[in-house]
Image: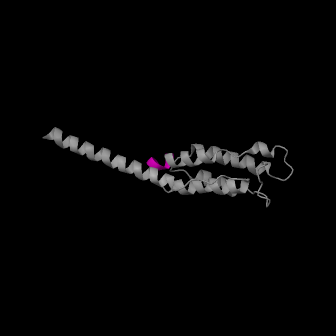
Amino acid sequence: AAALRGLVAAGRASHVGGAEAAACAAARAEHRPKQTDSLAEYKDEAQGCLTWCGQFKANCFAGCKDDCVGYLGAPPCAAFVMDTDGCKAPCDQLTDVHKCLVTVQHNSTETCHSKFGGIAVPASGCEYAA
């Protein structure tokens, strides 16, 4: 009887874990960054990833963040190597933000949020080259 109770309890625990995993997957599917065409859009979408995923507990945060940041990718700073319009510096800063997003944990998102404040993308938005 004790073994049976243990099996029932174990089954309940795995069912909760499965339900939680399904809820995490559904929540992650609700937010996917759009494809960006400029550094201004990239900054907005990267902040969106951090804000959206930051609402989840540790068990959902990592998967959400990895999906979102993986879909967004790193900013294409090679497009701004011949900087004539003030876009290289903010792109380099966004590269640092991307690195932060890749490694951030659910209980320290403020470290990445604080990096966004110092990034001034020029009024042009810094569109990617065609």
Q: Nearer the viewer, residue 95 or 39?
A: 39
- Relative placement, left or right, of 118 versus 60 is right
Q: Is residue 57 visible?
A: no
Name the main secondary structure of what is drawn in magenta: helix
Viewport quadrant of the N terminus:
top left
Residue 126: x and y in percent read: 78, 54
* Residue extending farthest top: 3
Residue 83: x and y in percent read: 84, 47
- Tell me how many marks there are: 0
Looking at the picture, the colour scheme in use is one colour
Q: Residue at left 60%, top 57%?
A: 48
Q: Residue at left 24%, top 45%?
A: 9
Q: Is residue 94 visible?
A: yes
* Residue extending farthest left: 1
Boundaries of the magenta span: 58-62
Q: Is residue 82 magenta?
A: no
Q: Nearer the viewer, residue 32 or 88?
A: 32
Residue 16: x and y in percent read: 33, 49
* Residue extending farthest bottom: 123
* Residue extending farthest right: 84
Q: Which quarter of the figure has residue 122?
A: bottom right
- Relative placement, left or right, of 21 versus 4 is right
Q: Please tell me whether residue 11 is drawn above or below residue 38 in the rendered image.
A: above
Q: Residue at left 55%, top 45%?
A: 66
Q: Nearer the viewer, residue 53 or 32?
A: 32
Residue 2: x and y in percent read: 15, 40
